């Protein structure tokens, strides 16, 4: 049976040891291996990083099916998915600024927490049609959010199959764990979750591999897949490669970029060996 996996970096910096682990993990788990460039954020993504990423992957000894998919070419598909969710009555415009959201959370007696911090308090969800239209016609900036409670009620109970390096088996989905996520911004028809589910389906990915830091994202992605009638992939979340202080390597951490290691004389075999006995790996919460 074919297992299709993908490595999906954002070209916002150089690849480091953590990415090498992710790419090799995806390759090892798949019979078909794809690369996807997640370049929705045009301000942060750079062609030079993209070229360097593909160069690093080839140096590691990886090959992938061409063409490489770039999310920046997929805006029409994301727009169509968004329109579908809108037609289902599951999307509302949110006019809150980051500061307003933070202030509202600070005022609340208890703010529900999500995997990435306090959840959006839902300020714009109950706005009347008239109030929405007035603010839209005034040209106020907005994001489009998913009414997650309504969406979850329509989708019914969900689960996913986890085959990674932490908890495995059938995991029950908590579709509300991220609250009313941003699906798109005013000028960009997609944000991370919507783009990922659309592309995993489009590319025929059957096993989504990625780090434990994105484990919780699977809950909301299963909900979106169900709402959009997309096939359900299996998941394998891998351990994270951490630095000596227990933090994830950051793209700013020059010392462990594959390019720097290569310039210091490391071979792809050294990289694989170092990742294999990495005692700095950690399985994250949830
Ligand atoms: N582009 C994401 C990242 O660089 C990975 C997305 C995913 O695997 O779902 O962390």
Image (cartoon, helix red, strand yellow):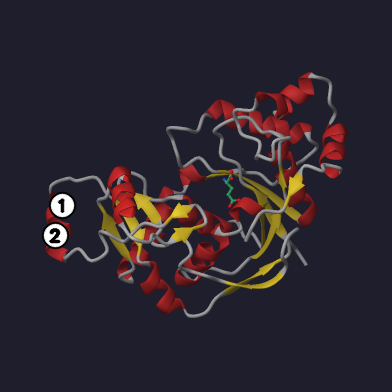
Question: How many numbered circles does the render carry?
Answer: 2
Q: Name the residue beneath numbered marker 2.
A: 131
Q: Quadrant of residue 126?
A: bottom left
Residue at 80% in and 19% down: 264
Secondary structure category for the residue under label 1: helix
Q: Is residue 40 left or right of residue 273?
A: left
Task: Name the foreground residue: 85 vs 69.
Answer: 85
Give the CA separation, mark 2 to mark 1. Answer: 6 Å
Crowding at dot 1, Cα within 10 Å, few <14 / some 14-19 / many 20+, comes out as: some
The spot of residue 230 in percent (x, y) is 52, 68
107 above or below 17? below
98 above or below 30? above
Tag of residue 135: 1
Residue at 36% in and 73% down: 150
Tag of residue 277: none
Secondary structure category for the residue under label 2: helix
């Amino acid at each position: 049976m074919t297992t299709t996996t993908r490595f999906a970096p954002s070209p916002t910096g150089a690849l480091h040891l953590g990415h090498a682990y992710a790419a090799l993990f995806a390759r090892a788990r798949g019979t078909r291996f794809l690369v996807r460039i997640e370049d929705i954020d045009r301000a942060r993504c750079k062609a030079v990083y993209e070229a360097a990423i593909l160069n690093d992957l080839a140096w590691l000894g990886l090959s992938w099916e061409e063409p490489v998919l770039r999310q920046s070419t997929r805006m029409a598909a994301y727009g169509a998915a968004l329109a579908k969710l809108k037609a289902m009555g599951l999307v509302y415009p949110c006019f809150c600024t980051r500061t307003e959201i933070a202030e509202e959370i600070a005022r609340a007696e208890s703010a529900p927490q999500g995997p990435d911090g306090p959840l959006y308090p839902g300020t714009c969800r109950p706005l009347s049609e008239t109030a929405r239209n007035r603010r839209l016609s005034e040209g106020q900036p907005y994001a489009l959010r998913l009414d997650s409670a309504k969406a979850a009620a329509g989708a019914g109970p969900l689960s996913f199959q986890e085959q990674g390096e932490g908890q495995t088996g059938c995991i029950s989905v908590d579709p509300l764990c991220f609250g009313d996520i941003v699906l798109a911004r005013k000028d960009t028809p997609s944000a991370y979750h919507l783009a990922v589910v659309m592309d995993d389906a489009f590319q025929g990915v059957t096993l989504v591999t990625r780090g434990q830091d994105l484990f919780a994202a699977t809950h909301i992605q299963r909900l979106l897949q169900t709402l959009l009638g997309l096939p359900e992939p299996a998941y394998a979340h891998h351990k994270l490669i951490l630095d000596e202080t227990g933090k994830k390597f950051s793209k700013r951490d020059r010392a462990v970029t594959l390019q720097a290691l290569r310039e210091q004389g490391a071979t792809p075999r050294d990289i694989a060996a170092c990742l294999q006995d990495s005692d700095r790996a950690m399985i994250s919460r949830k």
